[in-house]
C-alpha cells in the first residue's frame, strides 16, 4: 500500500524502518499510534521526527528500540532484523543503540551518584572496573562536566542542563552507533537549550553517530537534522532535506506547523492560521487523508483515497493529493484538465 | 453591601453598569511601583522579586520574559496577593489609581477579582476536576455581579461562544477531563473574561500546548483584547511568543528588571547584554542545519547565592571587574525620556556594530522609539 522509501542501498543505512505499525489497547478500543511508516537513517545522519503531541513520534522512537516491540513491521539495525530477535542476542545489539529522554531529572535514578549513573551500562555489559572509571571520567569531561565536582553528586543536586549532560554521557559512554533523542531539550530554558544542542552536535560529529531526533519544535529540529520527517496521526506526511521541508514545505500540514512557530521578530506579520480545529482522536482517524479534517484545501478526493508518500523531486517525499509544489500541475491536472 | 441581598432590579442595573461602562476612566489600567517580595526559606532569606515597576495603559499589552527562576511568576503572585505565607511584599499595585495593597481584605477581593484575571500555565491543575465546567465559569460572575443561575448560565454560554467553543450548552455540563488541552485553556479564558476584567494576565498560558494550538490561543487572546479594549500581560520564557503580540516588554533576570521598553526597540535596539544574548540563543529557521548556536555560558544564579554587582556578570562575555562590584541601576540613555531603561554598565551598541558591518555612512540613525503613552 505505501511506497517503499527511495531505494537507498540497504547496506548503507544503519537503521531501516519498514512498514512499522504500533498499536496499543486502550479501554474498549485499539489505538494505532504508528500506522505503517518507513524510513532509513544512514550512518552519521540525523533524522528529525516532528509533529504535534499524539502524532506517534515518540511511539516510533520507542518502537525502534523495542520499547515495546512494534505490532508489525521491520526494524533493521546495521543489516540485522531486530524485531523478534532472541533476548540474549538483542541485549548485545541494544548496547549500540541508546536513548535520551525529555525529562533528564526523572530519567536518572535519584539515589545514585553521577559517576555510577554514567558507568551503569558499562557495569552491566561486564567491562572491567578500572576501564569503567577511566571511560566515565573521559566521557564526563567530553560533555563538559568535571568528575571531581559532580562525580559524587546525585541528580537533585544538579541543574536541568547538567542532568541532561549526564544523560548524554550515560548514553554515549557505551559507544553507540545510534541514539534516539526524545524531546531532549523541551524542558530546558532557551539559554541552556543551545548548550545541549551544541553538545549533541559535537558528539555526533566526533563519534559519527546516527541520530533519530524527536521534537515538537521545528526550529530545533531544523538546526540539528539532515532530513526531517513530519508526522501526523501516526503517518509520515512529508519527508525531505531539512532545508527543503522548512523553506519549501510541500504538505499543507508542514506549512501550517511552520507558520505556527513563533518568530522572534516584532515586525514579522502574524500569518493567519492554516489549520482548522484540533488534532482528531487517533482511535478513529478520519478516512482517506488523515489531515483532511483540518486542511483548508481538502477536496472530496481527500476523504476517499489515502494519499501515498511519493517523491516530488529532489528527494522530497510527500503524502498529499494536492501538494503545494512539485508535481502540482500533474496531480491537479486530473481534476482541472491539465495545465502542463 | 452583600450582593445576595440586592433586589433583582438593582442587581441588573449593577451588571449593566459594569458591562457597558468599562471605558478608560483613569490614565492607566495597572501601575506597579517598586514591588519587592522577600521569602523566608530554610536556606535563608531570598528575594525572588526586587524593585519591579511598570505601567500598563488601557488597551495595551505588555510582555514579561525571563528564564525559569527569573521571578516572573512570583511577580504575578505578588501583584495578585497570592504569595506563600512566609513572603513579605512591599511596594504599590495600583489598579485604576486604587492601591490594592492598602485595601481591606474583603474590598480588595471585590476590586481585584473583577478587575484582574489570571490564566495559568496548566489548565488541568487550575480547573477543578470534579466540578462541571459551567459552574467553574459562573462562579466568579455570580459572586461579582450577583446574577441568578439562569442569567449566569446565559452569560457562560455567551462567553464559551466568544472563545470559540462549539456546542456551549453541552460543554457546560462536561468536566475538564472531557476536553483537550487547547479547549481547557479556552475554558480558562472564558472564565477569566467573565467579570470583564480591566487586565488579563496570561502566565505561560500557552507553554504546555502544541505550537499549532498555541498560535490559536494567542490569536484568540489578541482578538479578545482588541474587541474589549482590555489590557493584557503575557508572561513567557519564549521571546517568539511576545514578539509580534505586545506593545511593551520587560526582561527579567534573577528577580530584577534588566531591561524594559517598547517591544520593537528591545528586539532591534536592545542595550542589555542579557537581552541580546537571549535573542541570539534562539534557534531559528533561517540558519543552516548543523550550525552552532549561540549560547549563554553557565546557568542562572541561585537566589540564595546572589553576589554583589550585576547579576548577569558571571555569564556575560563583556563583564569587567566593575560589573562584578558595582550594582548597576536601571537607567535611560536618553535623559529626556524614561521609555527605554536598562541595567547594564557596558550596554550593547547596535549602531556601532552595524556601522562596522555595513559601512554606509549615509545610513540614517535608528528612529526614536515612540513614547510609551498611557493611551494608545
Image (cartoon, rainbow, N blue to C red):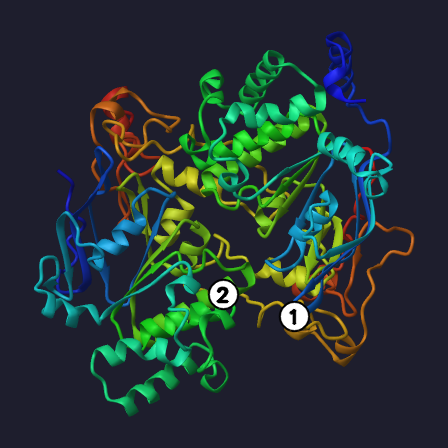
Q: CA distance from mark 1 to mark 2?
A: 20 Å
As drawn, the residue found furthest toward the bottom would be: A130
Label 1 neighbour load within 10 Å: few <14, some 14-19, many 20+: few
Identified at 20% across, 61% down, the residue is A15
The residue that mark 2 highlights is A160
Horizontal arrangement in the rendering, residue A302 relative to residue B83 (left or right): left
Mark 2 element type: helix
For the residue pair A312 and B283, the one nearer the viewer reads as: B283
Q: Quadrant of residue A51?
A: top left
Q: Quadrant of residue B140?
A: top right
Q: Is residue A181 above or below residue A244?
A: below
Q: Chain of mark 1?
A: B
For the residue pair A10 and A155, the one nearer the viewer reads as: A155
Label 2 neighbour load within 10 Å: few <14, some 14-19, many 20+: many
The residue that mark 1 highlights is B43
Identified at 51% across, 42% down, the residue is B125
As drawn, the residue found furthest toward the top would be: B9
Q: Quadrant of the C terminus of chain A?
A: top left
Identified at 50% across, 57% down, the residue is B283
As drawn, the residue found furthest toward the right would be: B336
Amino acid at each position: 500500500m505505501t511506497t517503499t522509501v527511495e531505494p537507498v542501498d540497504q547496506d548503507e543505512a544503519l537503521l531501516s524502518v519498514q512498514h512499522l505499525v504500533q498499536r496499543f489497547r486502550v479501554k474498549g478500543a485499539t489505538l494505532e499510534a504508528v500506522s505503517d511508516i518507513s524510513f532509513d537513517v544512514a550512518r552519521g545522519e540525523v533524522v528529525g521526527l516532528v509533529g504535534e503531541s499524539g502524532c506517534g513520534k515518540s511511539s516510533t522512537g520507542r518502537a525502534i528500540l523495542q520499547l515495546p516491540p512494534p505490532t508489525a513491521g521491520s526494524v533493521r539495525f546495521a543489516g540485522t532484523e531486530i524485531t523478534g530477535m532472541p533476548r540474549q542476542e538483542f541485549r548485545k545489539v541494544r548496547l549500540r543503540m541508546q536513548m535520551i529522554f525529555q525529562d533528564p531529572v526523572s530519567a536518572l535514578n535519584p539515589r545514585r551518584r553521577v559517576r555510577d549513573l554514567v558507568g551503569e551500562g558499562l557495569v552491566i555489559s561486564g567491562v572491567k572496573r578500572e576501564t569503567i572509571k577511566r571511560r566515565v571520567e573521559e566521557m564526563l569531561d567530553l560533555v563538559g562536566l568535571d568528575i571531581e565536582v559532580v562525580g559524587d553528586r546525585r541528580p537533585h543536586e544538579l541543574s536541568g542542563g547538567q542532568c541532561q549532560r549526564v544523560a548524554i554521557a550515560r548514553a554515549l559512554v557505551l559507544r553507540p552507533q545510534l541514539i534516539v533523542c526524545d524531546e531532549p531539550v523541551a524542558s530546558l530554558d532557551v539559554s541552556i537549550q543551545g548548550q545541549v544542542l551544541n553538545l549533541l552536535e559535537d558528539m555526533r560529529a566526533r563519534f559519527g553517530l546516527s541520530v533519530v531526533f524527536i521534537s515538537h519544535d521545528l526550529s530545533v529540529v531544523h538546526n540539528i537534522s539532515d532530513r526531517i520527517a513530519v508526522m501526523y496521526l501516526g503517518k509520515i506526511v512529508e519527508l525531505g532535506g531539512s532545508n527543503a521541508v522548512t523553506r519549501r514545505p510541500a504538505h499543507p500540514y508542514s506549512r501550517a506547523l511552520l507558520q505556527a512557530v513563533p518568530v522572534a521578530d516584532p515586525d514579522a506579520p502574524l500569518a493567519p492560521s492554516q489549520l482548522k480545529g484540533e488534532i482528531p482522536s487517533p482511535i478513529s482517524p478520519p478516512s482517506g487523508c488523515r489531515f483532511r479534517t483540518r486542511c483548508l484545501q481538502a477536496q472530496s478526493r481527500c476523504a476517499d483515497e489515502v494519499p501515498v508518500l511519493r517523491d516530488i523531486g529532489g528527494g522530497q517525499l510527500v503524502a498529499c493529493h494536492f501538494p503545494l509544489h512539485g508535481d502540482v500541475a500533474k496531480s491537479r491536472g486530473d481534476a482541472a484538465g491539465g495545465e502542463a | 453591601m452583600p450582593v445576595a441581598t440586592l433586589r433583582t432590579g438593582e442587581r441588573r442595573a449593577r451588571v449593566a453598569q459594569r458591562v457597558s461602562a468599562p471605558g478608560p476612566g483613569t490614565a492607566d489600567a495597572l501601575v506597579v511601583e517598586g514591588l519587592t517580595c522577600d521569602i523566608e526559606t530554610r536556606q535563608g532569606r531570598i528575594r525572588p522579586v526586587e524593585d519591579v515597576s511598570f505601567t500598563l495603559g488601557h488597551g495595551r499589552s505588555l510582555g514579561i520574559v525571563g528564564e525559569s527562576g527569573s521571578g516572573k511568576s512570583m511577580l504575578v503572585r505578588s501583584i495578585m496577593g497570592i504569595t506563600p505565607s512566609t513572603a513579605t511584599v512591599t511596594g504599590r499595585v495600583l489598579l485604576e489609581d486604587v492601591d490594592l495593597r492598602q485595601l481591606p481584605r474583603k474590598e480588595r477581593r471585590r476590586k481585584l477579582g473583577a478587575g484582574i484575571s489570571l490564566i495559568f500555565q496548566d489548565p488541568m491543575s487550575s480547573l477543578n476536576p470534579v466540578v462541571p465546567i459551567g459552574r467553574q465559569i459562573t462562579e466568579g460572575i455570580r459572586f461579582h455581579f450577583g446574577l441568578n443561575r439562569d442569567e449566569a448560565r446565559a452569560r457562560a454560554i455567551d462567553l464559551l461562544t466568544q472563545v470559540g467553543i462549539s456546542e456551549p450548552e453541552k460543554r457546560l455540563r462536561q468536566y475538564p477531563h472531557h476536553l483537550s488541552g487547547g479547549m481547557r485553556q479556552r475554558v480558562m479564558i472564558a472564565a477569566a473574561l467573565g467579570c470583564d476584567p480591566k487586565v488579563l494576565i496570561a502566565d505561560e498560558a500557552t507553554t504546555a500546548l502544541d505550537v499549532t494550538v498555541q498560535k490559536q490561543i494567542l490569536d484568540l487572546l489578541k482578538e479578545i483584547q482588541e474587541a474589549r479594549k482590555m489590557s493584557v500581560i503575557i508572561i513567557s520564557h519564549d521571546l517568539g511568543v511576545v514578539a509580534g503580540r505586545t506593545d511593551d516588554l520587560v526582561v527579567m533576570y534573577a528577580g530584577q528588571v534588566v531591561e524594559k521598553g517598547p517591544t520593537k526597540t528591545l528586539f532591534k535596539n536592545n542595550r542589555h547584554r542579557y537581552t541580546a544574548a537571549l535573542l541570539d540563543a534562539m534557534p531559528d529557521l533561517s540558519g543552516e542545519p548543523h550550525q552552532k548556536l549561540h549560547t549563554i555560558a553557565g546557568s542562572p544564579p541561585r537566589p540564595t547565592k546572589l553576589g554583589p554587582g550585576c547579576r548577569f556578570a558571571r555569564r556575560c562575555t563583556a563583564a569587567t571587574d566593575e560589573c562584578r562590584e558595582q550594582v548597576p541601576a536601571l537607567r535611560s540613555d536618553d535623559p529626556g525620556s524614561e521609555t527605554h531603561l536598562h541595567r547594564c554598565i557596558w550596554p550593547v551598541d547596535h549602531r556601532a556594530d552595524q556601522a562596522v558591518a555595513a559601512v554606509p555612512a549615509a545610513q540614517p540613525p535608528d528612529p526614536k522609539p515612540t513614547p510609551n503613552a498611557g493611551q494608545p
